[in-house]
Amino acid sequence: MNIAVAQSGGPTCAINASLLGVFSHAVKYDEIDLVYGSVNGIEGLIYDNLVNLFDIITDDEEIELIRQTPSTLLGSCRYKLPAYDKKPEIYEAILRTLRKYDIGAFFYIGGNDSMDTVMKLDRHFKENGIDIKVIGIPKTIDNDLPETDHTPGFGSAAKYVATSIQEITRDSSVYSIASVTIVEIMGRDTGWLTASSAILHANGEISPHLIYLPEKPFSIKQFIEDIREAQKKHYAVIVAVSEGISLSEEDIGEAFQSGNVDNFGHKYLSGVGKALEKIVAKELKCKVRSIELNVMQRCSSHLSSKRDITEAERIAGAAVKVALDGHSGKMMIFKRVANRPYNVKIEFVDVEKVANRVKYFPNEWINEAGNGVTKEAIEYCLPLIQGEQNFHMLNGIPKQYVLKCALPRDVGSHEP
Ligand code: F6P
Protein backbone atom coordinates (compact mmCIF):
# COMPACT_ATOMS: atom_id res chain seq x y z
CA MET A 1 0.00 0.00 0.00
CA ASN A 2 0.88 3.68 -0.18
CA ILE A 3 0.47 6.19 2.63
CA ALA A 4 -0.26 9.93 2.83
CA VAL A 5 0.78 12.60 5.29
CA ALA A 6 -0.40 16.20 5.76
CA GLN A 7 0.44 19.22 7.92
CA SER A 8 -2.30 21.33 9.47
CA GLY A 9 -2.87 24.39 11.67
CA GLY A 10 -0.33 27.00 12.75
CA PRO A 11 3.28 26.39 11.66
CA THR A 12 6.09 25.47 14.06
CA CYS A 13 9.84 24.84 13.86
CA ALA A 14 9.28 21.09 14.31
CA ILE A 15 6.42 20.23 11.96
CA ASN A 16 8.75 19.49 9.04
CA ALA A 17 10.71 17.14 11.30
CA SER A 18 7.44 15.25 11.86
CA LEU A 19 6.94 15.03 8.12
CA LEU A 20 10.44 13.57 7.86
CA GLY A 21 9.63 11.15 10.68
CA VAL A 22 6.73 9.67 8.71
CA PHE A 23 8.74 9.61 5.48
CA SER A 24 11.95 8.13 6.81
CA HIS A 25 10.20 5.44 8.85
CA ALA A 26 7.83 4.52 6.03
CA VAL A 27 10.71 3.74 3.68
CA LYS A 28 11.95 1.10 6.13
CA TYR A 29 8.78 -1.01 5.86
CA ASP A 30 8.27 -3.43 2.96
CA GLU A 31 4.49 -3.04 3.33
CA ILE A 32 4.74 0.62 2.26
CA ASP A 33 5.46 1.57 -1.30
CA LEU A 34 5.00 5.31 -1.90
CA VAL A 35 4.64 8.21 0.55
CA TYR A 36 2.38 11.03 -0.64
CA GLY A 37 2.16 14.52 0.82
CA SER A 38 -1.26 16.16 0.85
CA VAL A 39 -0.93 19.87 0.03
CA ASN A 40 -2.57 22.33 2.46
CA GLY A 41 -3.58 19.70 4.97
CA ILE A 42 -6.84 17.86 4.38
CA GLU A 43 -7.63 20.23 1.49
CA GLY A 44 -5.10 18.29 -0.60
CA LEU A 45 -7.19 15.14 -0.23
CA ILE A 46 -10.40 17.01 -1.05
CA TYR A 47 -9.01 18.57 -4.21
CA ASP A 48 -6.66 15.76 -5.25
CA ASN A 49 -3.53 17.83 -4.67
CA LEU A 50 -0.95 15.22 -3.72
CA VAL A 51 2.79 15.08 -4.26
CA ASN A 52 4.99 12.04 -4.21
CA LEU A 53 7.46 12.80 -1.41
CA PHE A 54 10.13 10.76 -3.20
CA ASP A 55 10.09 13.51 -5.87
CA ILE A 56 10.67 16.21 -3.25
CA ILE A 57 13.01 14.55 -0.79
CA THR A 58 15.77 13.14 -2.93
CA ASP A 59 18.95 13.03 -0.84
CA ASP A 60 20.39 13.23 2.67
CA GLU A 61 21.35 16.89 2.34
CA GLU A 62 17.73 17.76 1.59
CA ILE A 63 16.64 15.80 4.64
CA GLU A 64 19.00 17.82 6.82
CA LEU A 65 17.79 21.10 5.34
CA ILE A 66 14.13 20.20 5.80
CA ARG A 67 14.89 19.41 9.44
CA GLN A 68 16.23 22.95 9.99
CA THR A 69 13.49 24.69 7.99
CA PRO A 70 10.49 26.11 9.87
CA SER A 71 6.87 26.26 8.73
CA THR A 72 5.10 23.58 6.69
CA LEU A 73 6.76 22.15 3.61
CA LEU A 74 3.40 21.02 2.26
CA GLY A 75 1.44 24.13 3.25
CA SER A 76 -1.25 24.08 5.90
CA CYS A 77 -4.93 24.79 6.45
CA ARG A 78 -7.47 25.84 9.05
CA TYR A 79 -10.18 23.66 7.58
CA LYS A 80 -12.99 22.28 9.70
CA LEU A 81 -14.28 19.02 8.27
CA PRO A 82 -18.09 19.23 8.28
CA ALA A 83 -20.18 16.35 9.65
CA TYR A 84 -20.88 13.66 7.02
CA ASP A 85 -24.63 14.35 6.93
CA LYS A 86 -24.00 18.05 6.21
CA LYS A 87 -21.56 17.58 3.31
CA PRO A 88 -21.22 13.93 2.19
CA GLU A 89 -19.56 15.11 -1.03
CA ILE A 90 -16.45 16.17 0.95
CA TYR A 91 -16.03 12.66 2.35
CA GLU A 92 -16.60 11.21 -1.11
CA ALA A 93 -13.94 13.51 -2.57
CA ILE A 94 -11.46 12.50 0.15
CA LEU A 95 -12.18 8.82 -0.39
CA ARG A 96 -11.86 9.18 -4.16
CA THR A 97 -8.36 10.64 -3.73
CA LEU A 98 -7.32 8.03 -1.19
CA ARG A 99 -8.51 5.22 -3.49
CA LYS A 100 -6.95 6.79 -6.59
CA TYR A 101 -3.50 6.72 -4.94
CA ASP A 102 -4.06 3.37 -3.20
CA ILE A 103 -3.56 4.93 0.22
CA GLY A 104 -3.99 2.61 3.19
CA ALA A 105 -3.01 5.02 5.98
CA PHE A 106 -3.28 8.77 6.44
CA PHE A 107 -1.19 10.68 8.99
CA TYR A 108 -2.37 14.13 10.08
CA ILE A 109 0.12 16.37 11.89
CA GLY A 110 -1.76 19.05 13.82
CA GLY A 111 -3.41 20.41 16.95
CA ASN A 112 -6.79 19.91 18.64
CA ASP A 113 -8.80 21.10 15.63
CA SER A 114 -6.89 18.79 13.28
CA MET A 115 -7.61 15.90 15.65
CA ASP A 116 -11.30 16.60 15.03
CA THR A 117 -10.61 15.76 11.36
CA VAL A 118 -8.79 12.56 12.37
CA MET A 119 -11.73 11.57 14.57
CA LYS A 120 -14.42 12.27 11.94
CA LEU A 121 -12.57 10.52 9.11
CA ASP A 122 -11.78 7.48 11.23
CA ARG A 123 -15.42 7.17 12.37
CA HIS A 124 -16.67 7.48 8.82
CA PHE A 125 -14.26 4.84 7.54
CA LYS A 126 -15.07 2.41 10.36
CA GLU A 127 -18.84 2.87 9.99
CA ASN A 128 -18.59 2.11 6.28
CA GLY A 129 -16.15 -0.79 6.48
CA ILE A 130 -13.40 1.18 4.72
CA ASP A 131 -9.98 -0.15 5.68
CA ILE A 132 -7.96 3.07 5.77
CA LYS A 133 -6.11 3.91 8.96
CA VAL A 134 -6.08 7.49 10.24
CA ILE A 135 -3.51 8.54 12.85
CA GLY A 136 -2.95 11.96 14.47
CA ILE A 137 0.54 13.27 15.15
CA PRO A 138 0.56 16.10 17.72
CA LYS A 139 1.93 19.55 16.94
CA THR A 140 1.42 23.04 18.32
CA ILE A 141 3.47 25.78 19.92
CA ASP A 142 0.48 26.30 22.24
CA ASN A 143 1.21 22.97 24.00
CA ASP A 144 -2.50 22.64 24.76
CA LEU A 145 -3.28 19.08 23.63
CA PRO A 146 -4.69 16.84 26.36
CA GLU A 147 -3.20 13.41 27.13
CA THR A 148 0.33 14.19 25.89
CA ASP A 149 3.02 15.55 28.24
CA HIS A 150 3.90 18.16 25.63
CA THR A 151 3.55 18.83 21.93
CA PRO A 152 6.27 19.03 19.28
CA GLY A 153 6.87 22.66 18.40
CA PHE A 154 6.45 23.93 21.95
CA GLY A 155 10.05 23.36 23.09
CA SER A 156 11.50 25.40 20.22
CA ALA A 157 9.00 28.22 20.69
CA ALA A 158 9.70 28.25 24.44
CA LYS A 159 13.45 28.45 23.80
CA TYR A 160 12.88 31.42 21.50
CA VAL A 161 10.56 33.19 23.95
CA ALA A 162 12.93 32.84 26.92
CA THR A 163 15.97 33.84 24.86
CA SER A 164 14.21 36.86 23.36
CA ILE A 165 13.04 38.09 26.74
CA GLN A 166 16.58 37.80 28.01
CA GLU A 167 17.81 39.95 25.11
CA ILE A 168 14.93 42.41 25.52
CA THR A 169 15.78 42.69 29.22
CA ARG A 170 19.39 43.66 28.45
CA ASP A 171 18.26 46.26 25.91
CA SER A 172 15.50 47.69 28.05
CA SER A 173 17.68 48.24 31.09
CA VAL A 174 20.23 50.68 29.69
CA TYR A 175 18.76 53.99 30.82
CA SER A 176 18.38 55.23 34.37
CA ILE A 177 14.74 56.07 33.81
CA ALA A 178 11.57 54.22 34.75
CA SER A 179 10.33 52.06 31.91
CA VAL A 180 7.88 49.24 31.28
CA THR A 181 8.34 46.73 28.46
CA ILE A 182 5.39 44.49 27.66
CA VAL A 183 6.09 41.35 25.61
CA GLU A 184 3.07 39.73 23.98
CA ILE A 185 3.33 35.97 23.50
CA MET A 186 1.15 33.57 21.48
CA GLY A 187 -1.18 30.97 22.93
CA ARG A 188 -4.79 31.22 21.92
CA ASP A 189 -6.47 29.66 24.95
CA THR A 190 -3.65 28.70 27.23
CA GLY A 191 -0.59 30.22 28.87
CA TRP A 192 2.00 27.45 28.39
CA LEU A 193 4.20 29.48 26.05
CA THR A 194 3.93 32.70 28.05
CA ALA A 195 4.81 30.75 31.20
CA SER A 196 7.94 29.44 29.47
CA SER A 197 9.38 32.97 29.72
CA ALA A 198 10.04 32.10 33.39
CA ILE A 199 12.73 29.62 32.28
CA LEU A 200 15.01 32.67 32.53
CA HIS A 201 14.64 32.56 36.30
CA ALA A 202 16.54 29.26 36.26
CA ASN A 203 19.52 31.28 34.98
CA GLY A 204 19.34 33.73 37.87
CA GLU A 205 17.44 36.40 35.94
CA ILE A 206 14.64 38.22 37.74
CA SER A 207 12.96 39.21 34.50
CA PRO A 208 10.23 38.80 33.42
CA HIS A 209 9.04 40.49 36.59
CA LEU A 210 5.36 39.88 35.86
CA ILE A 211 3.68 37.09 33.86
CA TYR A 212 -0.02 37.00 32.89
CA LEU A 213 -1.77 33.92 31.49
CA PRO A 214 -5.28 33.44 30.05
CA GLU A 215 -6.06 30.89 32.77
CA LYS A 216 -6.52 33.69 35.35
CA PRO A 217 -9.01 36.54 35.06
CA PHE A 218 -7.18 39.73 34.10
CA SER A 219 -7.85 43.05 35.80
CA ILE A 220 -6.36 46.29 34.47
CA LYS A 221 -6.54 47.85 37.91
CA GLN A 222 -4.53 45.02 39.45
CA PHE A 223 -2.11 45.05 36.50
CA ILE A 224 -1.28 48.72 37.07
CA GLU A 225 -0.92 48.07 40.81
CA ASP A 226 1.45 45.15 40.09
CA ILE A 227 3.63 47.36 37.88
CA ARG A 228 3.70 50.13 40.51
CA GLU A 229 4.84 47.56 43.06
CA ALA A 230 7.51 46.15 40.69
CA GLN A 231 8.77 49.68 39.97
CA LYS A 232 9.68 50.07 43.64
CA LYS A 233 12.40 47.46 43.07
CA HIS A 234 13.22 47.67 39.34
CA TYR A 235 13.45 50.78 37.21
CA ALA A 236 13.03 48.71 34.03
CA VAL A 237 10.03 46.40 34.45
CA ILE A 238 9.58 43.54 31.96
CA VAL A 239 6.13 41.98 31.59
CA ALA A 240 5.24 38.77 29.71
CA VAL A 241 1.61 38.71 28.68
CA SER A 242 -0.34 36.09 26.77
CA GLU A 243 -2.24 37.14 23.65
CA GLY A 244 -5.15 35.14 25.08
CA ILE A 245 -5.80 37.18 28.23
CA SER A 246 -9.27 38.63 28.23
CA LEU A 247 -9.71 42.37 28.44
CA SER A 248 -13.21 43.70 28.78
CA GLU A 249 -14.31 46.43 26.39
CA GLU A 250 -14.73 48.65 29.39
CA ASP A 251 -11.03 48.11 30.15
CA ILE A 252 -9.74 48.96 26.73
CA GLY A 253 -12.16 51.63 25.69
CA GLU A 254 -12.16 50.63 22.05
CA ALA A 255 -11.64 47.33 20.28
CA PHE A 256 -8.00 46.69 19.39
CA GLN A 257 -8.34 43.27 17.84
CA SER A 258 -9.72 42.73 14.35
CA GLY A 259 -12.66 40.66 15.58
CA ASN A 260 -12.26 38.35 12.56
CA VAL A 261 -12.43 34.61 13.11
CA ASP A 262 -10.98 31.55 11.38
CA ASN A 263 -12.93 28.48 10.17
CA PHE A 264 -13.10 27.10 13.69
CA GLY A 265 -14.58 30.33 15.02
CA HIS A 266 -11.31 31.22 16.80
CA LYS A 267 -10.68 34.95 17.01
CA TYR A 268 -7.51 36.22 15.35
CA LEU A 269 -5.74 37.52 18.42
CA SER A 270 -2.70 39.80 18.70
CA GLY A 271 -2.78 43.40 19.78
CA VAL A 272 -3.16 42.94 23.53
CA GLY A 273 0.37 44.23 24.20
CA LYS A 274 -0.27 47.44 22.26
CA ALA A 275 -3.55 48.00 24.13
CA LEU A 276 -1.81 47.54 27.49
CA GLU A 277 1.02 49.84 26.40
CA LYS A 278 -1.47 52.67 25.87
CA ILE A 279 -3.10 52.07 29.22
CA VAL A 280 0.22 51.95 31.11
CA ALA A 281 1.47 55.12 29.39
CA LYS A 282 -1.69 56.93 30.42
CA GLU A 283 -1.75 55.65 33.99
CA LEU A 284 1.95 55.64 34.90
CA LYS A 285 3.31 58.35 32.61
CA CYS A 286 6.64 56.57 32.07
CA LYS A 287 8.43 55.16 29.05
CA VAL A 288 6.46 52.14 27.79
CA ARG A 289 7.09 49.83 24.87
CA SER A 290 5.18 46.77 23.73
CA ILE A 291 6.78 44.00 21.68
CA GLU A 292 4.73 41.37 19.91
CA LEU A 293 6.86 38.29 19.31
CA ASN A 294 4.30 37.37 16.67
CA VAL A 295 5.21 34.66 14.14
CA MET A 296 8.92 34.83 15.05
CA GLN A 297 8.19 32.64 18.07
CA ARG A 298 7.04 29.79 15.84
CA CYS A 299 9.41 30.14 12.86
CA SER A 300 12.77 31.14 14.41
CA SER A 301 14.37 27.80 13.70
CA HIS A 302 17.86 29.23 14.27
CA LEU A 303 16.96 28.97 17.96
CA SER A 304 15.07 25.69 17.81
CA SER A 305 15.46 23.06 20.49
CA LYS A 306 17.29 20.01 19.21
CA ARG A 307 15.30 17.84 21.59
CA ASP A 308 12.06 19.22 20.18
CA ILE A 309 13.14 18.50 16.60
CA THR A 310 14.37 15.01 17.47
CA GLU A 311 11.22 14.15 19.38
CA ALA A 312 8.99 15.48 16.58
CA GLU A 313 10.68 13.09 14.19
CA ARG A 314 10.54 10.16 16.62
CA ILE A 315 6.86 10.47 17.50
CA ALA A 316 5.91 10.72 13.83
CA GLY A 317 8.04 7.70 12.99
CA ALA A 318 6.32 5.71 15.75
CA ALA A 319 2.94 6.62 14.22
CA VAL A 320 3.81 4.64 11.07
CA LYS A 321 4.27 1.47 13.10
CA VAL A 322 0.99 2.09 14.98
CA ALA A 323 -0.92 2.23 11.67
CA LEU A 324 0.85 -0.86 10.33
CA ASP A 325 -0.10 -2.69 13.53
CA GLY A 326 -3.73 -2.09 12.55
CA HIS A 327 -4.66 0.85 14.77
CA SER A 328 -6.73 3.79 13.62
CA GLY A 329 -8.43 6.81 15.24
CA LYS A 330 -5.46 7.33 17.56
CA MET A 331 -3.19 10.23 18.42
CA MET A 332 0.42 9.70 19.39
CA ILE A 333 1.45 11.01 22.83
CA PHE A 334 4.52 11.56 25.00
CA LYS A 335 4.52 10.24 28.56
CA ARG A 336 7.19 11.81 30.77
CA VAL A 337 8.87 9.08 32.78
CA ALA A 338 11.42 11.26 34.57
CA ASN A 339 12.72 14.82 34.59
CA ARG A 340 16.30 14.23 35.70
CA PRO A 341 17.55 12.56 33.64
CA TYR A 342 14.75 13.44 31.25
CA ASN A 343 13.03 10.42 29.77
CA VAL A 344 9.82 10.07 27.75
CA LYS A 345 7.87 7.13 26.37
CA ILE A 346 5.84 7.31 23.16
CA GLU A 347 2.35 5.82 23.32
CA PHE A 348 -1.03 6.50 21.69
CA VAL A 349 -4.59 7.28 22.86
CA ASP A 350 -8.04 7.37 21.28
CA VAL A 351 -8.23 10.62 19.36
CA GLU A 352 -11.66 11.35 20.95
CA LYS A 353 -9.76 12.18 24.13
CA VAL A 354 -7.96 15.01 22.36
CA ALA A 355 -10.16 16.34 19.55
CA ASN A 356 -11.58 19.79 20.29
CA ARG A 357 -10.31 19.67 23.88
CA VAL A 358 -7.84 21.99 25.55
CA LYS A 359 -5.18 21.26 28.17
CA TYR A 360 -4.90 24.37 30.32
CA PHE A 361 -1.79 25.47 32.21
CA PRO A 362 -2.14 24.01 35.74
CA ASN A 363 -3.67 26.41 38.22
CA GLU A 364 -1.31 25.19 40.93
CA TRP A 365 1.67 26.36 38.84
CA ILE A 366 0.42 29.97 38.89
CA ASN A 367 1.41 32.07 41.90
CA GLU A 368 -1.19 33.31 44.34
CA ALA A 369 -1.11 36.85 43.01
CA GLY A 370 -1.82 35.56 39.50
CA ASN A 371 1.19 37.41 38.06
CA GLY A 372 3.88 34.74 37.92
CA VAL A 373 4.51 30.99 37.78
CA THR A 374 6.04 28.50 40.21
CA LYS A 375 9.30 26.55 39.94
CA GLU A 376 7.34 23.45 38.86
CA ALA A 377 6.55 25.23 35.60
CA ILE A 378 10.24 25.95 35.04
CA GLU A 379 11.19 22.34 35.84
CA TYR A 380 8.59 21.15 33.36
CA CYS A 381 9.86 23.40 30.54
CA LEU A 382 13.61 23.06 31.02
CA PRO A 383 14.18 19.62 29.45
CA LEU A 384 12.09 20.55 26.41
CA ILE A 385 14.34 23.40 25.26
CA GLN A 386 17.66 21.54 25.43
CA GLY A 387 20.15 21.24 22.60
CA GLU A 388 20.90 23.15 19.42
CA GLN A 389 20.85 21.97 15.84
CA ASN A 390 24.09 21.95 13.89
CA PHE A 391 23.09 24.30 11.11
CA HIS A 392 24.08 24.31 7.47
CA MET A 393 24.83 27.96 6.71
CA LEU A 394 24.87 29.94 3.49
CA ASN A 395 26.48 33.38 3.37
CA GLY A 396 26.29 33.59 7.14
CA ILE A 397 22.57 32.73 7.23
CA PRO A 398 21.06 29.34 8.17
CA LYS A 399 20.25 27.55 4.94
CA GLN A 400 16.62 26.61 4.46
CA TYR A 401 14.93 24.09 2.22
CA VAL A 402 13.00 25.67 -0.63
CA LEU A 403 10.88 23.54 -2.92
CA LYS A 404 12.23 23.39 -6.46
CA CYS A 405 8.80 22.79 -7.95
CA ALA A 406 5.42 24.46 -7.40
CA LEU A 407 3.02 22.41 -5.29
CA PRO A 408 -0.30 21.45 -6.90
CA ARG A 409 -2.84 23.81 -5.39
CA ASP A 410 -5.78 23.39 -7.72
CA VAL A 411 -9.01 24.02 -5.82
CA GLY A 412 -11.18 22.96 -8.74
CA SER A 413 -14.51 24.52 -9.45
CA HIS A 414 -16.25 23.56 -6.23
CA GLU A 415 -16.00 25.10 -2.78
CA PRO A 416 -15.78 22.38 -0.10
O1 F6P B 1 -1.38 27.28 16.12
C1 F6P B 1 -1.47 28.02 17.26
C2 F6P B 1 -1.22 29.48 17.00
O2 F6P B 1 0.13 29.68 16.66
C3 F6P B 1 -1.66 30.33 18.17
O3 F6P B 1 -0.68 30.46 19.15
C4 F6P B 1 -2.05 31.61 17.49
O4 F6P B 1 -3.03 32.31 18.22
C5 F6P B 1 -2.63 31.15 16.22
O5 F6P B 1 -1.98 29.94 15.90
C6 F6P B 1 -2.44 32.11 15.07
O6 F6P B 1 -3.09 31.61 13.97
P1 F6P B 1 -2.77 32.02 12.46
O7 F6P B 1 -1.52 31.37 12.05
O8 F6P B 1 -3.93 31.49 11.71
O9 F6P B 1 -2.65 33.51 12.45
Image: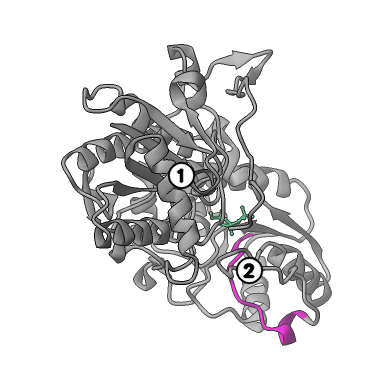
Q: Residues within 10 Å of mark 1 (few under 14, many from 20)?
A: many
Reply above or below: 247 against 396. Answer: below
Secondary element at tag 1: loop
Disc marking residue 153: 1
Reply above or below: 136 against 99. Answer: below
The foreground one among 415 and 171 is 415
Reply above or below: 51 against 238. Answer: above
Cα separation between marks 1 and 2: 21 Å
- Residue stretch in magenta: 239-252
Q: Residues within 10 Å of mark 2 (few under 14, many from 20)?
A: some
The foreground one among 327 and 353 is 327
Residue projecting furthest to the left: 325
Tell me if 123 is positioned left or right of 294 in this view. Answer: left
- Quarter of image, ligand 1: bottom right
Q: Residue at x 38, y 29 (%)?
A: 35
Q: Which residue is mark 2?
A: 267
Q: Residue at x 52, y 19 (%)?
A: 391
Provide residue 297's location: percent of width, then percent of height: 59, 46
**Quarter of image, res 320:** top left
**Quarter of image, res 33:** top left
